[in-house]
Image (tube, coloured by chain):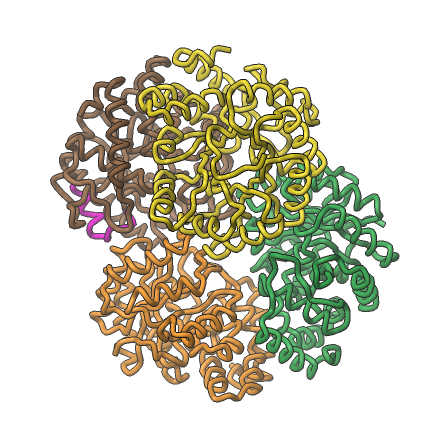
Chain colours: A orange, B green, C yellow, D brown
Amino acid sequence: MKLDSNARGVYVIAPTPFHPDGRVDDASVDRMTDFFLGAGVTGITVLGQLGEAPKMTHEESVAIVKRVIARAKAIPIVVGVSAPGFAAICALTQDAMAAGAAGVMIAPPNTLRTDDSIAQYYKQASDAIGADVPFVIQDYPLTFSVQMTPAVIRRIVTENAACVVLKHEDWPGLDKISQLRAFERDGSMRHIAILTGNNALFLDFEMERGADGANTGYCFPDMLVDVVRLSAAGDRDEAHDLFDAHLPLIRYEQQPGPGLAVRKYVMMRRGIIASDTLRKPGAQLSAVAKAEVDYLLARVARRDRRAKL
Amino acid sequence: MKLDSNARGVYVIAPTPFHPDGRVDDASVDRMTDFFLGAGVTGITVLGQLGEAPKMTHEESVAIVKRVIARAKAIPIVVGVSAPGFAAICALTQDAMAAGAAGVMIAPPNTLRTDDSIAQYYKQASDAIGADVPFVIQDYPLTFSVQMTPAVIRRIVTENAACVVLKHEDWPGLDKISQLRAFERDGSMRHIAILTGNNALFLDFEMERGADGANTGYCFPDMLVDVVRLSAAGDRDEAHDLFDAHLPLIRYEQQPGPGLAVRKYVMMRRGIIASDTLRKPGAQLSAVAKAEVDYLLARVARRDRRAKL
Amino acid sequence: MKLDSNARGVYVIAPTPFHPDGRVDDASVDRMTDFFLGAGVTGITVLGQLGEAPKMTHEESVAIVKRVIARAKAIPIVVGVSAPGFAAICALTQDAMAAGAAGVMIAPPNTLRTDDSIAQYYKQASDAIGADVPFVIQDYPLTFSVQMTPAVIRRIVTENAACVVLKHEDWPGLDKISQLRAFERDGSMRHIAILTGNNALFLDFEMERGADGANTGYCFPDMLVDVVRLSAAGDRDEAHDLFDAHLPLIRYEQQPGPGLAVRKYVMMRRGIIASDTLRKPGAQLSAVAKAEVDYLLARVARRDRRAKL
Amino acid sequence: MKLDSNARGVYVIAPTPFHPDGRVDDASVDRMTDFFLGAGVTGITVLGQLGEAPKMTHEESVAIVKRVIARAKAIPIVVGVSAPGFAAICALTQDAMAAGAAGVMIAPPNTLRTDDSIAQYYKQASDAIGADVPFVIQDYPLTFSVQMTPAVIRRIVTENAACVVLKHEDWPGLDKISQLRAFERDGSMRHIAILTGNNALFLDFEMERGADGANTGYCFPDMLVDVVRLSAAGDRDEAHDLFDAHLPLIRYEQQPGPGLAVRKYVMMRRGIIASDTLRKPGAQLSAVAKAEVDYLLARVARRDRRAKL
């Protein structure tokens, strides 16, 4: 099962569960995978930035890929393979695809500054991993400091047949989606799937602008599934009502740094993972921050029953 | 009336109203000032980043300062004087203080990279404008790319008697407020006012962490006044309820770039300013973006009567 | 006399001489202008970055422009007008051109990150100052953090008839010159003058790659004139011999920060300006640094008689 | 043999020789190691930035470490272990030290922006690899965008007993060396070795400011050995004469990007490595650039017999 440009729904970004001593927690990996399946996600992306990928060895990474694929069975697994050099990218891609991954996700190195250098990077990367490996562009300037215009994305799509999905998390980013869809309509770019990230902060309007779904890891992926479904069905007010109920917490979890600690804390409170441990260097929630999250959870629960822990 | 460390409430960031041809719209300046007074703000900050200060000549800047001061009479006016060099900073400070401004706001140049260079900059700036001019530190890394730790802010406060207010808009930033208040409690830093910006995205919790109010320009400053009042009075749930009603729009307006266009569009729709024109280079709202804002306004109005236009 | 694409030779970047108390030193401005004329420069650029432009008020800037133009009479004066907004850029441009300037130099704001945003900036800037004002692109990524590919420069040249000179100080930059000249040969770009900066660190090879001259302020502009002349005449070894004699000092003066202090110190020692004062914030040479410069001067003097002070 | 704070002389930065098809060229690794020994270097640093470390797999990296150690026998081998996460850093450190490395070199991730975050990073890194592993701080802001003040370096040295060497390649950087040596004299910092990089662009004066030697990979390391020796012996003029003879080429090789291609090209021409291949993404020298290097080599050879190829 290979990833293609018809991807839609929710490709949830999976955190990597650790034991308090920092070892990977396999039981939590399984429980989390089961939870995602039950929540109705369409796919799972492992080893993204918020999967703490840079903190793991190659062997650990491959083990997680295999474990999630074995557990998830029926749905596609995408693997984040971003690294400073093509050697590491190729090594992980090869092992992941051999294990049955559906495709890989590649973020640009944060030194790229010109349109040419960005396009060239993706061309070289696709050449390096092989044109038969479908890949996702990760467009996240807030974290990677690389700004891709719609025209650059079109160029990457045009120059690389293996490019099938855009993980869109530019900010502001609504007009970018509209522009890319306009490129498709005017025939200047073939269709790709657009799945949005950035902790779903604009998922409500991103769907209305033409996104195909979400590719993020907000601690209530079940809510993401429903918002995407409602929006795709044209139930605009219902989609926004559900989204707005979660927005105070979405915003809190979207903070760079502590955001992942919030996500893991809530997933632990929801019983999905056993510990909210992050590997170093990683933010830790203070007692007051945890109390704030608890307060937000209680408020969300009044508007969406799922948040009742 | 000089700004001091007892500042509290809402110091609203005033946009600069322009005619469609780009000239300053004096009538709208007056109407906006009246509106702010009626909304219950404690002070007004003119010529901040979102006042399009870098797009104005010295003469235009001074004219606005004088006009708002003349109109506002009873409340303090703070003037953004950030510029690439001390000559321009001093020139505007001198004219603004002579016109009756309460103090100035200074953002760091975006080349500063070390703790020492940041502290040195504020020392030289205060020396240049004169130790009798109260100033506000603008701590906005998202825009200025300068990261100030709590320890650096403490150092600036300690080295400059004229530093009386922190415009806090770091992100994430809640723990920074807690840390600065802890410095005050442990006696290592004198008290300063902390007013928060970043379009109020975290105002609810910032107040609970120890902020004294808001220093931002969200298009419903009347709501900011109420949230600050409710939170200061300990009415936590009421503060959050009101805040959450606006959060979908707050988030939309907080986007860098189009955010100011949203703000001006809503203020125009509210009848506060005559035109939503931005000077070049400035974002323009597409028709679809305007429709999104209209939709958000309608939704907000269901939860807060003020949003009924 | 307007600047055009036939510019060649040395357009020396003039520092701004100050009295020890920070006031502009008019007598030194005159003496320096006379010295430049005597050294055989083709033009003078005032108020560049190393003219400490951001540290001066509009009035001071205009006064310098007028003074140098009045003194220089026969040669073109280019004025750096870079500023955070078009209002200040237009104000200085207008006054400078009215005073008889030959053109202006514009650096990009250091927030530009995409090809489109760079091209758009220059289009808007040229529209704002007027298409009748010839302008120089300043391409200096080391200082401005904006990277322009040859294709972006071609686009700026194509979209703006008033763009006549490239101040080339990219690093590495030799292939960029070759590429731009190839664009001219293949007919995809009209001819512009390329004058190189970056304290002449690669002037030897830049001339051989197709540059028309230098646009920098090394403390021996008389040497720059000779290197440009020798290189243009095809006297390769002589050009390199002279250049190499100065390279140890060129390298020392090219350091960002202390470099300008070195330049002013040497010009003071050469009797060209009365004081080596920089306005704040500005680097100061330590005693040991001055001794190093003295040592370098002595060594240069053994290979080029001009350096005998 | 462990690295300690008495390190001095030249720790040459070794490039990684590749076959034209991209495989590591073991024979060239051996020949290069022999050449370094013959040139009189004190130590060898492998897998630095210019050793193309990010382009290699863990297995390839370990193989090179072992090969160079086996060949070099008597002199210390330092291993660059910089990576985005501690897992990869620890994995390579462990294998390198087990193979007999003398210590490791660690560069800061380019997201660090405050003094605290830099100091914290080195503390966590040293804790992660173990306090028994001597390490080198790589201070190279031009490449890593991280600016360390002398006070931050003092803090790292004080907080980490295993920190024994500073690879100093800040620019400008002479005053930093003076300041660090002043810290030692005033008793506020214990002694560390300072070895300088940045392709030796300021080696002449760095030695006079208190550096203990060079830690860089200029294509004539034999010259570096002599400059360090002459300077340490107080033969100032001789040191500068030799240095100046090479400066035109040093400058050319110091360019980021093409610099490494120049280095490999010259080492190939000197018969030290078999091919000047770089792994992708990597700069390639144009024919005109190669001719420029040839010209520089011919000119250097007139002043230093070593350059006669």
In the depicted structure, whether residue B201 falls above or below residue D219: below
Nearer to us in this view, D2 or B84: B84
Residue C217 is situated, as x and y percent measured from the top left of the image, at 51, 28
Q: Quadrant of residue D32?
A: top left
The reply to whether residue A24 is visible in this rendering is no
Residue at coordinates 43% horizontally, 21% vertically from top-left? C226
Q: Is residue D22 above or below residue D70?
A: below
Depth check, front residue: A192 or C228: C228
Left or right, residue B232 beside residue B173: right
Residue under the image location 59 percent in, 19 percent down: C34
Q: Residue at x 44, y 76 (%)?
A: A214
Task: Judge whether residue D309 can be spotted in this image.
Answer: yes
Write down the region rendered in magenta.
D53-67
Q: Quadrant of residue B216?
A: bottom right
**C101 left or right of C41 in image:** right
Residue D139 is situated, as x and y percent measured from the top left of the image, at: 41, 38
